[in-house]
Amino acid sequence: MTRVLYLYGGWPGHNPYGVSDWAKGLFDELGFAVEESNDIFTLDRDLTGYDLIACNWNNATLWEGLTASQESHLLGAVEQGTGFVAWHGAGAAFRASVKYHWLIGADVLDHPAGEGVKHPYQLRIVDKEHEITRGVTDFDVASEQYYMNVDPRVHVLADTVFDGEHIAWIEGQRMPQIWTNQWGHGRVYYNAIGHYIEDLEHPAVSRLMKQGFAWAARSNETR
């Protein structure tokens, strides 16, 4: 059975505890065995026994980061084959930990429409043949539209275009929002959507996340 560490908590503005029921529902559908933790010090131990680490940790300040031990244990486990999945606020967590953001594949810079603003935008599926995007077509959401520094190594699954309403000089800028990454033997998946629980409950988003969890988890061949 696929073993999952589900780490969530931190800044309450992203409702990490309310979102936990949504995430656990997807894990149940997949038949995954889940260990939940709200304790960041969970990352201070050997994590190589997990097939997947799902991260919904949220920080409130720019100077928070992982300790050297936490960063080493997390990145080391993924390098050895443990999958890693994160979404929305986890892309802005641990700002002081450069390698954590290298692992995810990006660093969030801003949401031009403002904090918590339900700004309407479209998600365009770029890779329609990937296991994660299977059965998903372009769709619209109204939420925070993340502007990010993105590692050019990531494999983009979906992107969005900024309309320039709030920052004129980014009008027409296309920005990755959903992608995969590789860290050693481990698969990494990140989805920028998810400020509100209704964002995650959107059928397309839930499908992308469920299929993302399944894709990223360590495969039977590498256990």
Image: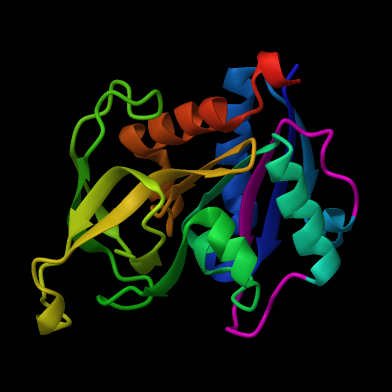
Q: Residue at x 86, y 61 (%)?
A: 41
Comparing 216 with 32, the one in front is 216
Label the magenta part by its dominant secondary structure.
loop
Q: Is residue 40 visible?
A: no
State left or right for residue 27 relative to residue 222: left
Q: Position of residue 12 (x, y in %)?
A: 61, 68
Comparing 220 with 10, the one in front is 220
Residue 2 vertical position relative to residue 169 in the rendered view, above or below: above
Comparing 53 with 30, the one in front is 53
Question: Is residue 53 part of the magenta span, yes or no?
Answer: yes
Residue 168 vertical position relative to residue 50 in the rendered view, above or below: below
Q: Quadrant of residue 9?
A: bottom right
State left or right for residue 16 relative to residue 140: right
Q: Position of residue 219 (x, y in %)?
A: 64, 20
Q: Position of residue 208 (x, y in %)?
A: 40, 33
- Give the quarter of the figure containing the C terminus: top right
